[in-house]
Image (cartoon, rainbow, N blue to C red):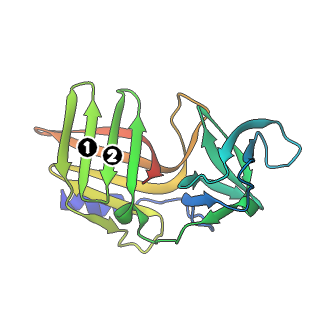
Amino acid sequence: MIRLIAALLFLPTLIWAQEYPALHDVTDVASDDVLNIRAEATSGAPIVGTLAHNATDVEVIAADGRWGRVNTGEGSGWVSLRYLARQEPNPDYPLAQRLSCYGTEPFWSADIIQGQRVQFSTPAGDYETPGAGLMVSASGVPGLWALAYGDSVATLRREECSDGMSDRLFGLSIAVFKRHGGEVSLLSGCCSITR
């Protein structure tokens, strides 16, 4: 298992110049107004959703100049970063946050709670397992973490990810290598930062 973790940490990864995804709070919007989510990163684009004037913990998964991409319903759109205040950055945010992860074929979900517990839901049933701790990549490449728990290992990568079922986009991908007896299976998917 240690060799598998070491091999996964040295996989090539997409390095982002900006550290996204990141949580933000809506700011400077009047209490009787909303922050528009637009189809494109321009003020003239159609509105595809809104955020309340006091919305908190808004996950921005990417930025394009003065605009940030957020999810809304089963899709995503763009909001003006002028009206979003980034929460205090944490370079080891998977350790400090709750991650909600999803995958298909087979359908599965997992909540990773502060790198200490993993709550899995699969067609075979639900279970919880303690984590062995989240490790920052030994290769020195930012945006890659590994979590060992039981006989399994998960790698988290900071990169754009699609669940393949909706028009939502995510800022983290996950690969879960699960050991069943003598065999190792792979579950892949995407993750969101939550509180």
Find disc 1 in the rendering and name its residue.
119
Question: Could you tell me residue 28's position as x and y percent?
Answer: 73, 62
Which one is earlier in the sequence, the residue at label 2 or at label 1? 2
Label 2, residues with CA under 10 Å away: few <14, some 14-19, many ≥20: many
Q: Report the amino acid beneath label 2.
A: Asp
Dots 2, 1 in contact, CB < 8 A: yes
Q: Is residue 191 above or below residue 158?
A: above
Give the position of the C terminus as an image quadrant.
bottom left
Q: Going 21% across and 56% down the picture, which residue do you hit?
A: 131
Residue 111: mark: 2
Q: Going 23% across and 53% down the picture, which residue do you hit?
A: 117
Pick out the residue farthest to the left: 181
Pick out the residue farthest to the right: 44
Give the position of the N terminus as an image quadrant.
bottom left
Residue 169 vs residue 106, the one in the foreground? 169
Q: Secondary structure at mark 1?
A: strand
